[in-house]
Amino acid sequence: MILDKVNSPDDVKKLSAAEMSTLADEIRGFVIKKVNTISGHCGPNLGIAEATIALHYVFNSPKDKFVFDVSHQCYPHKFLTGRKEGFTNPENYFLYTGYTAPEESEHDMFKIGHTSTSVSLATGLAKARDMKGEKYNVIAIIGDGSLSGGEAFEGLDNAAVLGTNIIIVVNDNDMSIAPNEGGLYKNLKELRDTNGQAECNFFKSLGFDYLFIDDGNDIEKLINGFNKVKDINHPVIVHIVTEKGHGLKAATENKEMFHWIMPNTLDENNEIVKSQDSSGEDWNSITKDYILNKIKDDNSVVVVNAGTPGVFGFDANYRKLLGSHYVDVGICEEHAVAFSSGIAKGGAKPILNVMSSFIQRTYDQLSQDLCLNNSPITLLIWWGGISGADATHLCTFDMAMMGNIPNLIYLAPTNKEEYLGMLDWSVNQNKYSTAIRVPTCGLNSTGIKDITDYSNEINKFKMVKEGEKIAVIGLGNFFNLGKKVVEEIKNKLDIDATLINPRFITGIDKDMLDGLKANHDVVITLEDGELNGGFGEKIASYLGDSDVKVLNYGANKEFTDRNSLDELYSRYRLTTSQIIADAVKCLKVGV
Amino acid sequence: MILDKVNSPDDVKKLSAAEMSTLADEIRGFVIKKVNTISGHCGPNLGIAEATIALHYVFNSPKDKFVFDVSHQCYPHKFLTGRKEGFTNPENYFLYTGYTAPEESEHDMFKIGHTSTSVSLATGLAKARDMKGEKYNVIAIIGDGSLSGGEAFEGLDNAAVLGTNIIIVVNDNDMSIAPNEGGLYKNLKELRDTNGQAECNFFKSLGFDYLFIDDGNDIEKLINGFNKVKDINHPVIVHIVTEKGHGLKAATENKEMFHWIMPNTLDENNEIVKSQDSSGEDWNSITKDYILNKIKDDNSVVVVNAGTPGVFGFDANYRKLLGSHYVDVGICEEHAVAFSSGIAKGGAKPILNVMSSFIQRTYDQLSQDLCLNNSPITLLIWWGGISGADATHLCTFDMAMMGNIPNLIYLAPTNKEEYLGMLDWSVNQNKYSTAIRVPTCGLNSTGIKDITDYSNEINKFKMVKEGEKIAVIGLGNFFNLGKKVVEEIKNKLDIDATLINPRFITGIDKDMLDGLKANHDVVITLEDGELNGGFGEKIASYLGDSDVKVLNYGANKEFTDRNSLDELYSRYRLTTSQIIADAVKCLKVGV
């Protein structure tokens, strides 16, 4: 294997073009095996193998600096920079992150997992280089949907006038995660169709020098092109056309499906395994069913998402069923929020879907475009909660970020019927900017339809079980934990504790909290997210002048990184035994 | 006066072109008088008078929908939509906001004050219109620097593929608030220089139809142009060239200075009043002096801001002194944060300046691009605090938004020396992503240089006066309020209360808080910002299981709107008498 000879970028420079092509195939083979075993980004890494090799052949990392946008396409880069054993040896599959990570290698400049940041970061590197009088190439590698994010445009707009060396490789694989949306992608197509010669050229309009490489999976063409721009003294775009999923038939024929795959997607012949019948209900399916039903009698419902339909189970078939009721704006969450606010002001009913980690991109849009205007939208936040995710994709922060924005109603359902009740209420009301945190716990059902008019119960908690001494407030995903704590308190302490479902993340029920003072020594809050700035602290503050003690439980303020849930729950004292041990200390009369 | 006849858009439609030109001049006269009396946006409103009149002449508001980006140029629109008495009668100068406000008029679609949002909001309106089968024009009016914001690009990228009517008027006055920066503005210049014919056309590259109007202060040309695009069935850009400050010599000759002016900037002949000597020190001047001194021995310092140098006192002379040490990236705060992170990773020393209200645009960049990477930047947050500002420009939320982001060190100095000490420490260290909330209180000086190495004191509060029973923790701007409370407690209750300067917004000093338990009944926290999600709640939570009571003071979670500080302080119980009254109730032994 050629790969056996390659332990660093220097080794790449010793290879012939033919050997490099073989190396790309070898890398792809290992990538496919790994992601088909433990899951991971597939198509992006298959497509960029040749370009990565050519970059390391032409440039001198780490002196020259590569910045991979979103960095889910950095696997080949990891092969070439001393980390191949993370792919070749299944025992080491979990050794390295799926993203660039400076703690792993001097060849990684930044920890990156959100899109559209590379050009700005690279422009900063270039500015530092210029101030320090140093000389090296700064290369941002962007594409695969990241160009539609506003931050990428802001970066391009400024990089264009930097006046010194910066090389921006646009990896154009004609795909976002889902198919590309937006005017810019039409221009990329025009440029591809004209071999880079089209009169309208987005990049040139911003003032960039521009180089087009028609086959970004051809090592020699890439090397020629990169050599042309190496050590260039001004900003340049290198537009390379690659094939997402290159080298794997199943992936090139199913680009969206193979962006990121689950274990055992492929059989031993690299054919797609027929998926098992997934007729079971889950949070995705009941959301999709609700929407399909709703659009039957309301033509004004518009389902919006920002380039990640797979997160919500919006597959191609479903999108077809929705027709004009469906809008994928591409990867641009800020626009998605403002666009939805506009839809609502125009008298229609937007249902905006965003993954918790990515709603972080929209604080100001939520505040100014949405809540300051009280636009009645329904915002579904998916995957929110403490998780074992990579540090770049944590979903721990949405409640602390959104929970303090005025006017927003952020709801935390605890079971299927409550979720659907909140969803239906939100879609039908026209007064509140509403968000719902779609649960990540199992789809538990009460069997009793929720027809609550939440407009009449804003910030009213639900008393599930009235007890004494200890009150447990279990928010959203953690309501079930609260229930268990109450059961265990009964078992262990023979105390009938109170159990409360707060329902509202964005407000507190002062009447109910005041009512607890008479016969409770301690109030326990449980939330599946960052504690600082979150839900429970508001209760601690409200009860701060009372004799009732308060114990808040949730995640620490930290970026965790692929930690197990058990480890995190234990660290955060989120186990029933830890919680009860703490509570006992707060009881006025020993038990 | 023509204006006497104009009470609604219908009245505009009855005017001749000559009358409309006169009307524009009349409007300008009143605008100048008003902003020179009570302050306000000057240049933007002078430049857009003709365009606004022409828009109302050609289109039918409110059936057709106007969305003014940033909306600080909406004064002429207010004249024409029933609100002229807010300008013509000095007694009504404070009747209307300086921005569009739906509660004032059916002709205002949104409450807008941050830039770059109009195209997204308008695209949403258009989508709602199409879903509901309605027919009207949707017109976004953007320019004056707003185009460089990423959200504007995201909006344009999507508007371009809407497929139905949307008209985007680009008001190109060759200025941002400060001079324009970035590649896009070079393209606008090229388009201006070629009468819209340049081969490279940013808007066409995105797929827009495009119309160029060379004189956007010529009523007839504007009417002709707008008539061409009225009821168009696809997305179109109307690029109009206006003169910022049109009709006022002082303003056209000093565009940046006249973007927004203070009272009495002009004399009765509309000449600039010679400004009084402002040699006194303030937070701006000591920051500027520090930086000038610093760059003498450190070539790697880079001062960054995003299009609002005036907020920081970075006038043209000062910018010249900084030379390559100064970068104005234009209005694009997200890029500014990521760019600064890149500068730091490249080994140089960025000092990024952002107004509190606008840092809201960067939650994810602070989290992902900056703090996840621990890039050692210095971020100065200006104007943070409870204020009498318009609802769109509140600076109340920065601590709650930034305070819960992992890894960030956010400092709250309380006097001149502490501020300079923190600034110097931050610039010279290379370990922490650091922000400093520049005080808004008076520039009080201790006379004692602060040489604290804050690296050794992360999250350590400063015990200013050790006392008993009541501990007052006064954060940043509110340290002085805390001092007053302690003094009053001595006077009124004869209690020697404890006074603490916490210094750190982003962490709590557990040791010191534990130490208070022995001889304190109550801890009082004071913060000049939103209480929810803020500093004090963390202390209430930490002390939740102790016998010490906690009283948190700060702003309610609400968008206030031009309320007086007295009114707000009283509403938030932020007066010494209110605080002491609350504290007395928490004392264990009556006094």
Image: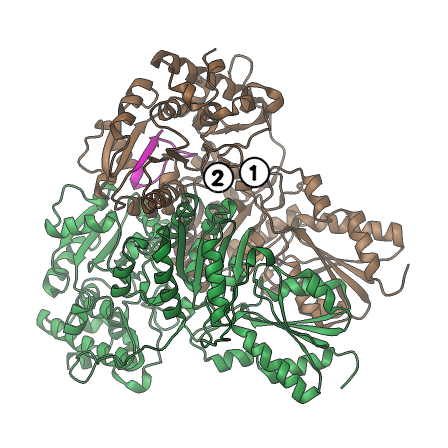
Chain colours: A brown, B green
The residue wearing badge 2 is: A113
Q: Nearer the viewer, residue A326 or A330?
A: A330
Q: Is residue B291 above or below residue A87?
A: below
Q: Nearer the viewer, residue A299 or B534?
A: B534
For the C terminus of chain A, the quadrant is bottom right
Residue at far bottom of view: B492
Q: Are marks 2 and 1 on the same chain?
A: yes
Mark 2 or mark 1: whose residue is earlier in sequence: 2
Q: Which of A201 and A468 is in front in this view?
A: A201
Whether residue A420 appears in magenta in the rendering, the answer is: no
Looking at the picture, how far across and down is residue B359, in whole percent? 43, 59
Q: In this view, does A168 lie above or below B353?
A: above
Callout 2 amino acid: Gly
The reply to whether dot 2 and dot 1 touch (C-beta < 8 Å) is: yes
Report whether A578 appears left or right of A23: right
Whether residue A174 appears in magenta in the rendering, the answer is: yes
**Location of residue A136 (image quadrant):** top left
**Location of residue B110 (image quadrant):** bottom left
Residue at far front of view: B297
Q: What element carries label 2?
A: loop
Q: Can residue A408 be seen in this view?
A: no
| Range of residues picked out in magenta | A166-185
Dot label at residue A28: none
Looking at the picture, how far across and down is residue B516, in whole percent? 72, 69
Looking at the picture, how far across and down is residue A547, in whole percent? 77, 70
The residue wearing badge 1 is: A390
Q: Is mark 1 on a helix, strand or loop?
A: loop
Crowd class of label 2 (few under 14; some 14 to 19; many from 20; radius 10 Å): many
| Residue drawn at the location 55% of the way across and 20% of the way down | A274
